């Protein structure tokens, strides 16, 4: 299905926040499945519960889950420019030149988004002041969300 893109109308704060919340709910489910895929086999193979209290295993699990989060966003952004939340709220990510994101673009956007959202969402809140309604990570990654026409 092909969509018409309205690049003159940047998505508003509520729409972007709603898509992000929707994606976080989905991502929570993915992370639960990913954790279960590690913990249950560990328990079955070794016969002992997963050692959550040992820092080596805890660090390994955290790094694994960070990789799952990155793969979640990379898969959707590179494949079609939309996560499931973005599709629901009719948003698509594009590069500044209007083309779709490549893997490098998605990685850069993901890295900047993680840094810019860390200080209490300041990177997202910036769009309320920006004349083009872009966030810090939109500008730094040279990508932008656009609204899809109905």
Image (spheres, rainbow, N blue to C red):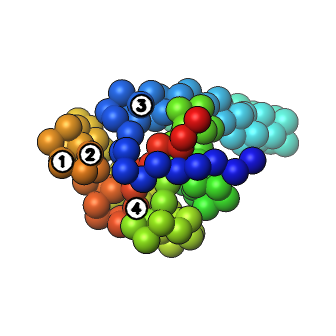
Disc 3 to disc 4, C-alpha distance: 17 Å
Of the image marks 3 and 1, the number of the one nearer the N terminus: 3
Q: What residue does disc 2 label?
A: 133
Most distant residue in the right direction = 45
Q: Position of residue 90 (x, y in %)?
A: 55, 37
The residue that appears at 25% across and 51% down in the rendered structure is 132
The residue that appears at 75% across and 40% down in the rendered structure is 37
Q: Position of residue 70 (x, y in %)?
A: 54, 54
Q: Is residue 20 above or below residue 79?
A: above
Q: What residue does disc 1 label?
A: 130
Under tag 4, what secondary structure? strand
Q: What residue does disc 4 label?
A: 143
Of the image marks 2 and 3, the number of the one nearer the N terminus: 3
Disc 3 to disc 1, C-alpha distance: 16 Å
The residue that appears at 36% across and 27% down in the rendered structure is 14
| CB atoms of marks 1 and 2 within 8 Å | yes
Q: For the residues carrying marks 2 and 4, which lies nearer the camera in this image?
A: 2
Q: What residue does disc 3 label?
A: 15
Under tag 3, what secondary structure? helix
Q: Position of residue 17 (x, y in %)?
A: 39, 31
Q: Residues within 10 Å of mark 3 (few under 14, many from 20)?
A: some
Under tag 2, what secondary structure? loop
Disc 2 to disc 4, C-alpha distance: 12 Å
């Amino acid at each position: 299905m092909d969509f018409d893109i309205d690049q003159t109308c940047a998505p508003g704060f509520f729409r972007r926040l709603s898509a992000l919340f929707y994606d976080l709910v989905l991502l929570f489910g993915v992370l639960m499945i990913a954790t279960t895929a590690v913990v249950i086999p560990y328990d079955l193979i070794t016969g002992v519960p997963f050692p959550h209290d040992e820092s080596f295993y805890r660090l390994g699990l955290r790094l694994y889950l960070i990789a799952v989060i990155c793969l979640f966003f990379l898969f959707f952004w590179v494949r079609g420019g939309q996560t499931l939340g973005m599709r629901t709220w009719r948003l698509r990510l594009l590069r500044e030149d209007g083309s779709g994101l490549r893997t490098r673009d998605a990685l850069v956007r993901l890295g900047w988004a993680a840094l810019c959202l860390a200080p209490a969402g300041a990177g997202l809140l910036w769009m309320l002041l920006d004349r083009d309604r872009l966030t810090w990570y939109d500008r730094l990654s040279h990508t932008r969300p656009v609204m899809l026409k109905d």
